[in-house]
Amino acid sequence: MHVPDGFLDAPTSIATAAAAATAIGLALRGARRELDERVAPLAGLVATFVFATQMINFPVAGGTSGHLMGGALAAVLVGPYTGILCLTVVLGVQAMLFADGGITALGTNVVLMGVVTVVVGYAVARAVQLVLPRRLPMVAVAAALGAIASVLASAAVFVGLYSAGGAVPIPLDTLLTAMLGVHTLIGVGEAVITFLVVASIVSVRPDLVHLARPVLVTRELETRLVAA
Amino acid sequence: MSARSTRAVSTPAVSTRTVSTRTVSTRTVLVVGLLVALVVAGVLSSYASGSPDGLNRVALDLGFADAERASAAGDGPLAGYEVAGADPRWSGGLAGVLGCLMVLACSSLFHLLRRSPRAVATQGD
């Protein structure tokens, strides 16, 4: 999904850079509430893990590949504000050091993979969590559904940006169908990886998982009620 | 063992179960997670699919792939996840490990942002 230089025109790239900068500013403020002694090192690990996992392109249909975006995963593990910062660090290192994603497209990539995936992934995971039973194993299920939604949202937002400032005119519905089609398959991969990672950490240390905290609070209250 | 002795330990067993979620230390989670990341970036990355990704596939199919311009960072020593001058067998994995360390270094940002220990203490744990 890393957008290279040249796909989007200058005005669109400037607009996405401004949007990315605004989102990072808000995230820097919001992350102070999420980060404590315990979460801060975990956030570094999440960023490193997302970087590493993004190197693994898995094959999807027809000579096409995809990799984890990681926005939903990061948001579920360390919180949405910190998640935006994790993905921003990853995307910045990729663009500057590895020429993965363009430099002028960095704002676009932060918006698509650092903000849209985090916000949509987290919102969907929270919404699913409200519907499902309040039990720890459900945290990874909610995260997985957030993950697939996050990839589709990111693909759809790219289509929106391309329609505003794409290099070559392409019929919007053709582009949308193509992007959503291939990213549905990639989204399934995203959901599987997100489920496995979240389920692993929830099974050993649920207290370290941001999205598991509401469940843990409920469980503690229930335990006290029974004891009394 | 008789049923009575089983019942005798059942009360502590409940509290042990609550504690058991903390038997794996945060340090262990961090170290294991970091090792997994390094193995993924350093070793497994060489088995990654070389096919174009979703966006590049769509760009090729719909005819806007040629609009791509080379990145200004394209001449850097790690561009394209290859270490310039390194043996091709190790180049990709080494680039991945260096990238992990770079991301980890940048993540010191999170320590600067974190709440002060005093603020955490007043909030309670």
Image (cartoon, rainbow, N blue to C red):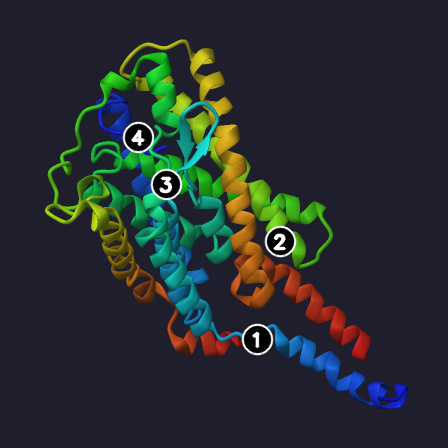
**Which is nearer the eye, A197 or B118?**
A197
Per the model, the C-alpha gap separating discs 4 and 3 is 19 Å
Both marks 2 and 1 on one chain? no
**Residue A54 placement: quadrant:** top left
User: Which of the chains bears the disc numbered 3?
Assistant: B
Residue underneath mark 3: B48
Residue underneath mark 4: A3
Instruction: State the image coordinates of residue A127 (x, y, percent, origin top left).
Output: 63, 44
Per the model, the C-alpha gap separating discs 1 and 4 is 42 Å
Q: Amino acid at mark 2?
A: Val
Residue underneath mark 2: A139
Per the model, the C-alpha gap separating discs 2 and 3 is 29 Å
> Is the Cβ of the residue at disc 1 closer than 8 Å to that at disc 4?
no
Q: Amino acid at mark 1?
A: Arg
Residue A85 seen in the current view: no
Residue A179 seen in the current view: yes
